[in-house]
Image: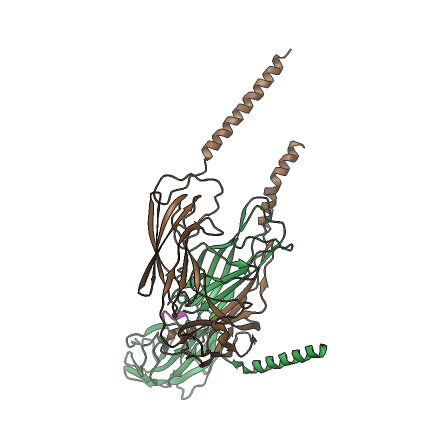
Amino acid sequence: MRRRLRRAAGALAAAATAAATLVTVVAAPASATVAKVQSSARVTSATSSISATLSATTAGDLLVATVGYAGTAPSFTAPSGWVKAVSMIANWSETEIWYYANNPGGITNVSFTFARGSTATLQLSEWNGVAAASPLDSTGTSTVSSTSVTVTASATVASGELAVTSFAEGYPTTASSITFTPGSGWTNLANGLAGSLDATTADYRTGVGSGSVSETETSSKTGSWAAVIATFKQGCSGGSLTLTTPSSLTFPTVTLNGVDQTNTATVSLTPSDLTASGAGWNIQATSTTFTNAGGKTLPTTATRFTGGTASTATGNCSLPTNQLSYPLTLPAGATAPAAVKVIDATASTGAGPTTLALTAAVTIPASTYVGTYTSTWTFTIASGP
Amino acid sequence: MSRRRAALLGVLPFATLVLGLLAAAPAGAAAVGGLGVRPAHSDPADPATKAYFKPVIAPGGTFSDAVTVTNSSDAPMTLFVTPVDGLTSTGSGAVYANRQDPVEKAGRWVAPATGTVTVPPQGSLDVPFTVRVPGTAVPGDHLAGIAVEDAHPHSSGGTFSVTEIIRAVVGIQIQVPGAAAFTMTAGTPSLAKLPGTSNAAVTIPLVNTGGLLGKPALTVSLAGDGYSRTVTRALDTVLPGDHIDYPFVWPDDVRSGSYAISVSLTAGHAVTTTQGHSTIGQVLDGAANPGAAKQTTVAAPRVVDEVVRAAPRASMPWLLMIGIAIIALLVGALGRRMWAFSLRRAP
């Protein structure tokens, strides 16, 4: 008998191993990430117009331009759709970051105009996974005369954002070549001299952690720096349909007193839809009957959800439109019965993380037996027909 | 028993209750879950396939793909991976069977490559699966799903302790080609109290008799004792072959009496009607506004004004009670004074 059990266990383990080998481990992170699609070389122009080229852009992507000017009054103007995120002037130079959110696609050339009389530089990049609407989150500026400069975004940012920096350094004497060193964790986009007295560089960092974002850029030559930073919000796409409970569900302790009572608690849930399917989603719930150690139970209709509210969590793109009516009885049984939907997001709503609060009320009849009652509640997030 | 002791005993239950409420178990600390799912591949022409699978599979055919399972927490997460049946919720809407439930419908056609996975922190895994549609499958929609469930659920404390299980399901809407339609029937409706609440609800037996899933609409009329109202509501998905007793929670308070019920069911372009009749012996609450919470715990018999719609509640007769209390105090004081007076007058 023991040998047979051992053989069965061995067979099970072998089957499990075989099955496990079929599972593909992929490096993709859990949520949508911002990724660089392409970036151009830095170009220079001493006329009143400057252009850079890209391979045809993809609709919906974010385009970013970092520009520099060997002067203090560049008066840059951009084509329709471009928005200036931030700019900074130093003693002899100026730099700016521009962006084009949710570009229509197919863009291959971008031209800026500027004030004649000095040299400008331009560098373009295309980014996937950035919020299509209002992507700019935080900006910051800095100026200093030194071999290095630190620039910090003025507000804390959410995890996963894209940060882009641009630096223009002006020199008191001519320079034929300059070496820039990005800060740790930052990647250079492109460098370039603007004439012989100024140089411009730009860096980026994807998937920044939540909180403060800054970069310290170092140059091979002391100069006067104009530094800017802009962070862009992660989009609600390229990820999964996810469910988290930020805290466990806890009912207040109730003392039985011989009269009917109602015990209420708030169920906190954080669904996050980064699929960009537009199909909506729902949260379903079922439970086992509240039972005490002596096997005494509450009625199977004891628990109901009396209401639900949704509020934006960091990174939210749209709140869910809930079409369910309350109260909703939480199904209960010795084994959990079929679930019911307790909150939903209709089509084209509920993109990104959302903070949900469901009010659960348990009716405790006057005749309830003394004891600690336990129940298992299953919450399921799903999307489907 | 002394008066002081009696007073203490009288106060004790309330004090215990208050202390019990104040001593509520601490709020839960750690986040639970953070698991997510999505189809590993989607059809660029159909954005919905970024959320769930929609394969068209002929009887006897197969379909293979993978579910991407993600873990957005900072710790490894061990998950059960199980095929599950698609079901119709009592209130309409496609839901998915529990992990422990026997797989009896389209879930039987789905075979994931593994039953458990451990997903690294902030990482993801692809779990391949195959759908094998039997040769006897009828044309139409068949809903299944692949459920991933946290293998280590968390429990709260307190006298009403809840263990929370978090799941995420990727639906698989298997479409078997062939002639199929969305058709439904409605049985005899009845008016009664919604179990577990004091709300009025018209229960309507509904069956999807066709081969396609769909979202029907109901128009319900309730008339009796001078009251009449018609309400229309769009329902969620009802799956082929499924039967539900749909609880149409009524918006208005309903007085005791006899009511005629008329139901019009729209499924696709077809409209069918059915009639019913119910007598209720108590006042039932209306649901007020859809989505709004409504007080449902009123134990005392209520006085309902003679109005046709949504009768307002009789409020607690506080003034009368206060008046009675004052009179009782005056009578008591007068009696005590007369008793003292009689003692003084006694020889």
Q: Which residue is depicted at the point 36% across and 81% down? A: A124
Taking the view exactly as shown, the residue that stands out farthest to the right is A2
Front residue of B22 and B221: B221
Position in image of residue A47 (x %, y %): 28, 84
Q: Main secondary structure of the magenta part?
A: loop
Magenta region includes residue A133: yes
Image color mode: by chain
Q: In this view of the protein, can residue A288 be seen by the observer? A: yes
In the rendered image of the structure, the colour used to display chain B is: brown
The quadrant where residue A325 appears: bottom left
Residue at the far top: name it: B347
Quadrant of the snapshot with the C terminus of chain B = top right
A115 lies left or right of A224: left
* x and y, in percent, of residue A267 in the image: 51, 58
Q: Is residue B147 above or below residue A169?
A: above
Q: Residue at x 47, y 29 (%)?
A: B323
**Chain letter, green in picture:** A
Position of residue B163 relative to residue B171, above or below, is: above
Horizontal arrangement in the rendering, residue B5 relative to residue B98 (left or right):
right
**The magenta segment:** A132-137
How many numbered dots are placed on residues in this image?
Answer: 0
Q: Residue furthest bottom?
A: A176
Counting from the top left corner in percent of width and height, residue B278 is at: 40, 48
Question: Is residue B184 or residue A98 the one in the foreground?
Answer: B184
Query: Percent x, y for residue B192?
Result: 44, 50
Magenta residue check for A161: no
Closest to the observer: B48 or A339?
A339
Q: Quadrant of the N terminus of chain B?
A: top right
